Image (tube, rainbow, N blue to C red):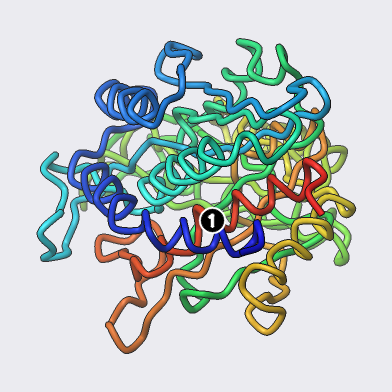
């Protein structure tokens, strides 16, 4: 039996255990930076596998190593995220969320369980490779400034320093058994925009006695789209969307202020910086010109995600060996964002997609929805696939 066949066989063999881990995590989700029980479960499982986890990195993050022969020869890092979303689950599965208003609707339970499976496989094969595999279980991917930034701050990319890092994410648009890759620019930066438009409230029947923040807010929202249509290059993917407007008035009451919240996405750090300056200046000047004022708060989020071309080509070849070339596909860039991008700004990184869709089983919902779920057959593939990628990066022929 070849080493590849051994990894594939082990991944299938441990799949029921990985599913069990995933279902436990899914039933017990925790929000960003509050993954206390999740962290304990991950650490406990790693110890049962035979590893010695380092706990408390960025409070709830965990790091563990599998050292092969000659551990310092090469180091590769593998990452999973652990936090859930503030969504009420609508699925009727046995492992439905037990925590009201919290749900693993983005697949982080899958990522964590799959990486635990990868750790188990590689630990059993540690006499078969040279180098070290660093396992990173991080908090807070779903909330600014991103748990990855805290993990890096606390030294996760040091002692030992990985030569590269690989991340996996579920993809409900791809059938289970299919793996997606994209070289180079892949995911957008993400910044949160908060505007408070301040005017002077009063009776709606006497608008001349007010400074209407609703009207001012309307002008600001429309005008800011000019930054996208007339300042951004048509060749530069950019999105500015406002999803929340709050004005506590009534049919006959003009409020004192209106709050607006939105997101700005870009795939170029220079343009990102320029655009945020323009957003602030335009919002403030429009409000001032209409007799009010606008307070602008920008919560800076993740940078754009760059998939290192050489690394991506390398792990793609490993995936083709593992699942067959016919099951490996190209994926398009997206204006979604991921804090894995922080790692890509420091060391060569690649973020690929694990197909989880199964139309025959009715598993088609997108991430961040109350009915998101996965075809758990993907968990027979994910752990071994990532293990094989790591082995390939460590020089296994």
**Residue 173 at x, y percent in the picture:** 50, 75
For the question of whether residue 365 can be seen, the reply is yes
Left or right: where 52 falls relative to 166: left
Whether 274 is drawn above or below 21: the answer is above
| Outermost residue, bottom side | 360
- Find residue 70 and report its image quarter: top right
Q: Dividing the image into 4 quarters, which one contains the N terminus?
A: bottom right
**Residue 161 at x, y percent in the picture:** 76, 20
Q: Residue at x 69, y 39 (%)?
A: 341
- Find residue 278 and report its image quarter: top right
Left or right: where 55 falls relative to 295: left
Q: Dividing the image into 4 quarters, which one contains the C terminus?
A: bottom right
Q: Residue at x 34, y 51 (%)?
A: 18
Tag 1 residue: 384
**Residue 375 at x, y percent in the picture:** 35, 70
| Outermost residue, front side | 1
How crowded pointer 1 is (Cα within 10 Å; few <14, some 14-19, many 20+) is rated as many
For the question of whether residue 298 can be seen, the reply is no
- Find residue 365 and report its image quarter: bottom left
Q: Residue at x 28, y 57 (%)?
A: 16
């Amino acid at each position: 039996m070849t080493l590849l066949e051994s990894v594939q066989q082990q991944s299938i063999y441990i799949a029921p255990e990985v599913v069990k881990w995933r279902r436990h995590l899914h039933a017990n989700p925790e929000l960003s930076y509050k993954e206390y029980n999740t962290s304990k479960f991950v650490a406990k499982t790693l110890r049962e596998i035979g590893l010695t986890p380092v706990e408390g990195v960025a409070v709830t993050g965990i790091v563990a190593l599998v050292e092969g022969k000659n551990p310092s020869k090469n180091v590769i890092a593998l990452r999973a995220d652990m936090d859930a979303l503030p969504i009420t689950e609508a699925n009727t599965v046995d492992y439905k969320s037990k925590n009201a208003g919290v749900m693993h609707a983005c697949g982080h339970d899958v990522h964590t369980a799959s990486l635990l499976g990868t750790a188990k496989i590689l630990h059993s094969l540690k006499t078969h490779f040279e180098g070290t595999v660093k396992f990173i279980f991080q908090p807070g991917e779903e909330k600014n400034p991103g748990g990855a930034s805290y993990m890096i701050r606390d030294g996760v990319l040091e002692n030992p320093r990985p030569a590269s890092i690989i991340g996996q994410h579920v993809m409900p648009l791809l059938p289970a058994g299919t793996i997606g890759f994209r070289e180079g620019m892949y995911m957008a930066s993400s910044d949160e925009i908060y505007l408070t438009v301040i005017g002077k409230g009063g009776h709606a029947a006497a608008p001349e006695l007010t400074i209407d923040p609703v009207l001012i807010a309307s002008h600001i929202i429309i005008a800011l789209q000019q930054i996208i249509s007339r300042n951004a290059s048509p060749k530069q993917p950019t999105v500015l969307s406002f999803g929340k407007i709050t004005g506590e008035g009534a049919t006959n009451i003009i409020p004192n202020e209106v709050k607006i919240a939105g997101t700005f996405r870009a795939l170029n750090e220079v343009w990102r910086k320029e655009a945020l300056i323009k957003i602030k200046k335009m919002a403030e000047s429009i409000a001032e010109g209409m007799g009010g004022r606008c307070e602008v708060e920008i919560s800076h989020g993740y940078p754009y995600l760059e998939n290192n071309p050489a690394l991506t080509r390398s792990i793609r070849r490993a995936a083709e060996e593992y699942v067959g070339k016919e099951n490996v596909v190209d994926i398009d860039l997206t204006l979604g964002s991921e804090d894995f991008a922080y790692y890509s700004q420091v060391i060569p990184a690649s973020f690929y997609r694990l197909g989880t869709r199964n139309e025959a089983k009715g598993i088609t919902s997108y991430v961040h929805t109350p009915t998101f779920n996965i075809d758990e057959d993907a968990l027979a593939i994910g752990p071994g696939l990532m293990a094989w990628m790591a082995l390939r990066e460590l020089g296994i022929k």
